[in-house]
Image: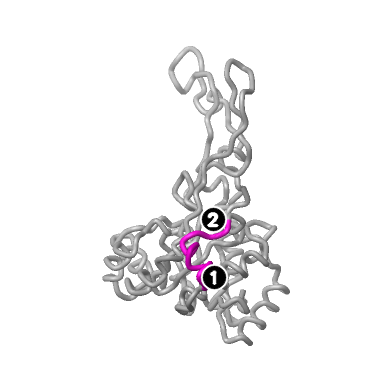
């Protein structure tokens, strides 16, 4: 991605990335990546964007000094509590509030600045005009995800993994008859615990699985949830003029060769390179293969 024109690259650290094992780096790979990126004069950032359960918090905090010693001082997190805890413990760490933190407005950005975040990521649904208003908040960098998938739920706030992976408990176990004061315990099932933490902040791509539709006990169809690719490449200049500090691409689900081509296209747009006549005609549309979800 560096050769394609990226100024900075986010990588997932093993066991702490929402991308899951398929895109995580172990420590040896992380060290090699940091050396390569540093030699190119660019920046490597680490995604610590799962949501650790209480016993895992101490393990996460133990990893930070080693990252700092390696020269990596920028991480992205998607849990407000973890962000605040990291800010209190590690003053040298630069913290980015992930798109999963849900910031979209001036008030949201002001909140994360007060919390101690150095940067915040906004979804590509935020317009250049809205970005200009948000830039009135000083003291925090603003990143815009200008290439992403517009999910049918708020990006980063999906609780579907929890409902699929957690085991619900019978209501009779949650509300015993003697506690309810009724003669019989209620019937049915209840999902206990936090649906957000049940998925541990990890993306299992539940929305990309085929869902079967039944009518009268008979399967009538198989469908995918809708997902629309957002590409704001035609508005790169508008976002820059509005004050966006970072233009970010969501591309972890793309193979290397397609992601490199995607980065190069945006690099050219940022640098104001003139496209050929053929490229000019399709400047607002990217190839279907560059969709950020593997549908």
> In the shown orientation, is residue 24 left or right of residue 182?
right
The x and y percentages for residue 94 are 47, 75
Magenta residues span: 276-287
Total count of labels: 2
- Say the numbered circle drawn on residue 138: none
Where residue 211 sits, quadrant-wise, is: top right
Helix, strand or loop at mark 2: loop
Q: Nearer the viewer, mark 1 or mark 2?
A: 1
Helix, strand or loop at mark 1: helix
Counting residues from the start of the chain, the first of labels 1 and 2 encountered is 2
- Say the numbered circle drawn on residue 51: 2
Q: Which residue is found at the position 59% from the left and 35% from the top?
A: 223
- Say the numbered circle drawn on residue 265: 1
Above or below residue 292? Residue 94 is below
Viewer-proximal residue, 178 or 8? 8
The x and y percentages for residue 222 are 62, 31
Where residue 124 sits, quadrant-wise, is: bottom left
Q: Pick out the residue farthest to the right.
A: 28
């Amino acid at each position: 991605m560096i050769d394609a024109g990226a100024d900075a690259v986010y990588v997932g650290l093993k066991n702490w990335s929402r991308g899951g094992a398929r895109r995580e780096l172990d420590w040896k790979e992380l060290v090699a990546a940091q050396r390569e990126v540093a030699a190119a004069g660019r920046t490597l950032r680490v995604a610590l964007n799962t949501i650790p359960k209480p016993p895992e918090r101490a393990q996460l905090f133990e990893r930070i000094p080693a990252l700092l010693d390696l020269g990596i001082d920028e991480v992205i997190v998607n849990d407000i509590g973890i962000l605040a805890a990291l800010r209190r413990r590690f003053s040298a760490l630069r913290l980015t509030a992930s798109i999963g933190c849900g910031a979209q407005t001036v008030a949201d950005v002001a909140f994360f600045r007060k919390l101690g975040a150095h940067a915040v990521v906004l979804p590509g649904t935020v317009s250049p005009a809205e970005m200009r208003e948000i830039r009135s908040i000083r003291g925090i960098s603003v990143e815009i995800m200008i290439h992403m998938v517009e999910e049918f739920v708020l990006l980063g706030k999906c609780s579907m993994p929890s409902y699929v992976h957690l085991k619900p408990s019978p209501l009779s176990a949650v509300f015993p008859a003697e506690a309810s004061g009724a003669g019989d315990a209620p019937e049915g099932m209840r999902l206990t615990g936090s649906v957000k933490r049940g998925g541990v902040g990890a993306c299992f791509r539940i929305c990309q699985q085929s869902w079967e539709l039944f009518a009268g006990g008979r399967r009538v169809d198989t469908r995918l949830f809708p997902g629309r690719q957002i590409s704001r490449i035609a508005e790169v200049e508008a976002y820059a003029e509005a004050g966006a500090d970072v233009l970010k691409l969501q591309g972890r689900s793309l193979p290397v060769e397609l992601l490199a081509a995607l980065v190069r296209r945006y690099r050219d747009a940022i640098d104001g390179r003139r496209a050929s006549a053929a490229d000019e005609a399709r400047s607002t549309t990217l190839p279907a293969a560059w969709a950020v979800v593997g549908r």
